[in-house]
Image: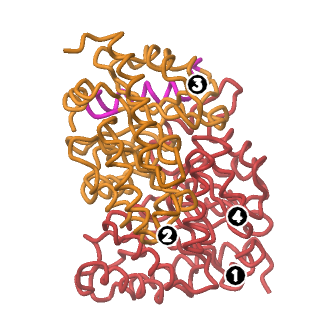
Chain colours: A orange, B red
Amino acid sequence: LTREQLVAEIFRKKSFLCVGLDPDASRIPTMMGTGNKAIVAFHRAIIEATKDFCVAYKPNLAFFEALGPDGWHVFQETISLIPDTHFIIADAKRGDIGNTSRHYADAFFKQLKCDAVTVTPYMGKDSVAPFLEEEGRWTIVLALTSNAGAADFELQQLSSGKRVFEEVIDRAMEWGGPHQLMFVAGATQSDELEKIRNRAPEYFLLIPGVGAQGGDLDAVARATFSNDVGILVNSSRSILYASSGTNFAEAAADEAQKLQHEMQRLLEERFVIT
Amino acid sequence: LTREQLVAEIFRKKSFLCVGLDPDASRIPTMMGTGNKAIVAFHRAIIEATKDFCVAYKPNLAFFEALGPDGWHVFQETISLIPDTHFIIADAKRGDIGNTSRHYADAFFKQLKCDAVTVTPYMGKDSVAPFLEEEGRWTIVLALTSNAGAADFELQQLSSGKRVFEEVIDRAMEWGGPHQLMFVAGATQSDELEKIRNRAPEYFLLIPGVGAQGGDLDAVARATFSNDVGILVNSSRSILYASSGTNFAEAAADEAQKLQHEMQRLLEERFVIT
């Protein structure tokens, strides 16, 4: 999806929800059975239950790779279940020297046709550039993440006065424009979100950490809305595992709809929606 | 392999060579045919040709993932061809929030039984810790990489006076000991290698960038040898693609043996080898 298409979907659905698909075999409802077929069936039910309330899905590769070598087939089958109208983010946090990142870009964009892939910036420009070269696809660079470890390096101050994640944002904006580059900005760092928005006013932010990780949707949206919304807020476990019983899909739909309702209220508060 | 086993293999073979397995479908000799079977056959020939001259293999996941969803099966078949005596490094440069990194650790250690996995440190301690929790396995943290992009963040100075990669090394040494943690230190930064050795005197360094990336083996070894050698030097493309003709395996063996001979000379210069 292009930026214009993504924004149109956000206003059409009155939602900027991204549903994370983190298939933890030990938490799949027992009624689904076991093995990789159960995981695909679980994803089919979750996608069916939530697709009207979200604009994006974000499968995280770690959970698929933990299934063993067939995990990538489960990943491929899972994304084939996602409607064309939805933005697909491969949450893979890849990055390597330029020649090698080129192959990761091929894997996620050419082979699997994902809209976007998350990329770790540690190795610098040539590790990120091959993703940005892919016409019509998106690169989502980790800036400030939602975990405790963000304090170890991301939040450290450089001798220039900037913090590492701020330098990441500044540099990355030189490498890619707002039609192809987003940033990951953790919702548990809500005092930082407004600063990130001011630093990168035109860029979409992918905001994890609402739900199981405890971020507050109102504060997040007020700190980060841009003129065309400019945010995707992700929730994974609180939707996927809303219930472990036979009503898991209904519970996931309820949880997704609850978030969509809050998002609609926040959108209507800020934007004129026709 | 344990550290003791790895060091014993290094002295036995008089080699600290790691052969990188980066299967670029466009560079596989045409005589091998095409498709994933050709890649496995290519790896079988390369491993057979080089195993006497190296102590480790480092398949890079990017090249396997670029093959499509079957790429992980090709990866699994490839590592099944590597003898038990050799150290297997999954060059995957993974890292995510703790709960998610746990799944990556399962993928590479429990499912695929690799000895080691490379990890990117950007997200801090909880993104690295799950790899270190795996008894008998190794975590190889990116410190200073061999690419131009290293200048963008890794080499930047923090307000403490340390550079980012130095802070990574100092923090990571608090998280894991030298029997389970190594660092990636790029050979193209040879003026830096000696400083890294002094900073982490007991830790193994995985040194890429000799060969196609242009590092100088003599300078590297003299700057980084520790009391038990303490380094693995990787070469990928200069061995794999030494020839594109029918003699590719012989050419790979020659190239690996040439490096082993140089390594033997350097080891004999520094250590008493019985």
Residue A34's label in the rendered image is 2
Q: Position of residue B118 (x, y in %)?
A: 57, 58
Q: Chain of mark 4?
A: B
Mark toward the viewer: 1 or 4: 4
Q: CA distance from mark 1 to mark 3?
A: 48 Å
Instruction: Let me know if marks 1 and 2 both belong to one chain.
Output: no
Q: Amino acid at mark 4?
A: Glu
Q: Chain of mark 2?
A: A
> Is B32 within the magenta?
no
Residue A189's label in the rendered image is 3
In the rendered view, does B232 fall on the left or right side of B48? right
Q: Amino acid at mark 1?
A: Glu
Residue A137's label in the rendered image is none
Sequence order check, earlier mark of 2 and 3:
2
Mark toward the viewer: 2 or 4: 2
Q: Nearer the viewer, residue B157 or B191?
A: B157
Residue designated by label 4: B134
Q: Is residue A42 above or below residue A184?
A: below
Residue designated by label 1: B9
Q: Position of residue A206 (x, y in %)?
A: 42, 32
Q: Position of residue B4 (x, y in %)?
A: 78, 75
| Residue depicted at 25% across the width and 70% down the height | B26
Specify start and end residues of the magenta stretch as a single range: A160-181
Q: Nearer the viewer, residue B258 or B157?
A: B157
Identify the secondary structure beneath mark 1.
helix
Identify the secondary structure beneath mark 2.
loop
